[in-house]
Image: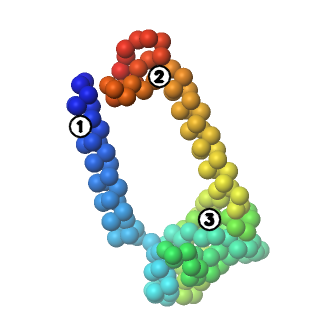
Amino acid sequence: MHRRRRLAVMVVVLACTLGLCVHYGASYDQNWPHPTGDQLAEDPDGWDGETVLLFGEVQEQTPDGLVMTVEDDSGTVVRTVTVRGTTVNVEPGGVVQVYGRLSQQGTVQTAESVVVVNKSSGDTSYKLLTSLLGGLVAAGLFLRYWRIDLRELRFVSRDGGERDG
């Protein structure tokens, strides 16, 4: 491919990707079937009896289950929810997703399923650092065998061949 054609293809692909990202961001809240923290704050008893998915930070583990807080979009705690019917072991500061029936003005949720996102508050840092290390290893291995030819906007094999990558 010629340089202009490659540049044009890159611009079109990036424009399409940006358009999809903007569309997703604009329509996400309308298509999400479960209440957000803002919706729970506005209408606390409007979701009673509904089976919903809530995300929250664990505050404490109790014999009945756990106590978590649900935040709104600005990060303000809008609801403290007692989750019953779960035996997961999560430290305070951990994050969970709870799917189950909501009751008592959105303060009690009977769990059908609980997924632990972060078992403790340090798990987020661990995941980010592991991802960064993996990305650096992958980029290093790629650049060991390939180099970037900026004049032609292509990858060139380091063994001297002129293969496109």
Looking at the rendered structure, the secondary structure element under dot 1 is helix
Mark 2 vs mark 3: in front: 2
Determine the CA span between mark 1 and mark 3.
44 Å
Total marks shown come to 3
* Apparent side of residue 102 relative to residue 66 in the rendered image (left or right): left
Task: Name the N-terminal-most of marks 2 and 1.
Answer: 1
Q: Quadrant of the N terminus?
A: top left
- Give the percent coordinates (x, y) of residue 94: 68, 64
Residue position for label 2: 146
Q: Which residue is mark 3?
A: 96
Residue under the image location 51 percent in, 26 percent down: 143
Check the image and report above or below for 125 versus 137: below
- Identified by mark 1, the residue type is Ala
First of labels 2, 3 by sequence position:
3
Kindly tell me whether residue 50 is visible in this rendering: no
At which x and y percent is residue 53? Answer: 51, 69
Q: Nearer the viewer, residue 37 or 110?
A: 37
Residue type highlighted by circle 2: Trp
- Circle 1 residue: 8
Tell me the distance, in whole angstroms, between the alpha carbons under discs 2 and 1: 23 Å
Q: Which image quarter is the C terminus in?
A: top left
**Which quadrant holds residue 80?**
bottom right
User: What kind of element bears circle 3?
Assistant: strand
Q: Is residue 23 above or below residue 103?
A: above
Give the residue type that dot 3 points to: Val
Distance, label 2 to label 3, CA atoms, is 42 Å
